[in-house]
Amino acid sequence: MAMDKTRTVVKIGGKEYTMTGFESEEYIHRVAIYVDRKMSELKSQYVNLNPSTLAVLTALYGVFGAIP
C-alpha cells in the first residue's frame, strides 16, 4: 500500500519553503515553527552571524539529544 506524501508551505526565517514528506501537515508545521523559533533565538544571541552559520547552528541545536 503506497502512502501519499504531504506537501505544504512553511515559513522559516522570513522565507517560504515547500516541504514534502509522509508526516502530517500539522507535524511539518510544528517542526517548522520550532526551527524558526530556534533560529530567531540564536540570531538574537549572536547578532553578527551570517545566514549560513546561523542555519548550521540551528541544525546542530535541533539534533542535540536526538543522537545517543
Image: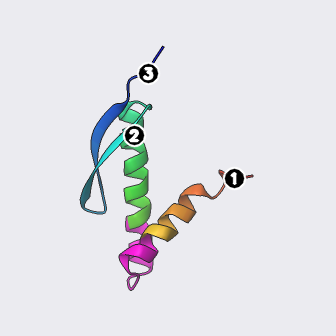
Asked if the residue at tag 2 contacts the one at tag 3, i.e. Cβ–Cβ closer than 8 Å, the answer is no
Q: Residues within 10 Å of mark 3 (few under 14, many from 20)?
A: few
Looking at the image, tell me whether mark 2 or mark 1 is earlier in sequence order: 2
Magenta stretch secondary structure, dominant = helix
Looking at the image, tell me whether mark 3 or mark 2 is earlier in sequence order: 3
Q: Which mark is residue 54?
A: none
Q: Secondary structure under badge 1?
A: loop
Instruction: Answer left or right for 62 relative to 46.
Output: right
Q: Is residue 17 magenta?
A: no
Colour pattern: rainbow
Q: CA distance from mark 1 to mark 3?
A: 27 Å
Give residue 7's quadrant in the image. Answer: top left
Which label sits in the foreground, 3 or 2? 3
Residue annotated with mark 2: 28
Residue annotated with mark 1: 67
Residue 6 higher or lower than 42, as above or below: above
* Amino acid at circle 2: Ile
- At x 59%, y 56%, the residue is 63
Q: Position of residue 31 (x, y in %)?
A: 43, 46
Give residue 6's quadrant in the image. Answer: top left
Q: Which mark is residue 3?
A: 3
Q: Residues within 10 Å of mark 1 (few under 14, many from 20)?
A: few
Q: Secondary structure under badge 3?
A: loop
Q: Position of residue 4 (x, y in %)?
A: 38, 23
Q: Range of the magenta residues? A: 40-54
Q: Position of residue 13 (x, y in %)?
A: 31, 63
Q: Position of residue 66 (x, y in %)?
A: 65, 50
| Farthest right residue in view | 68
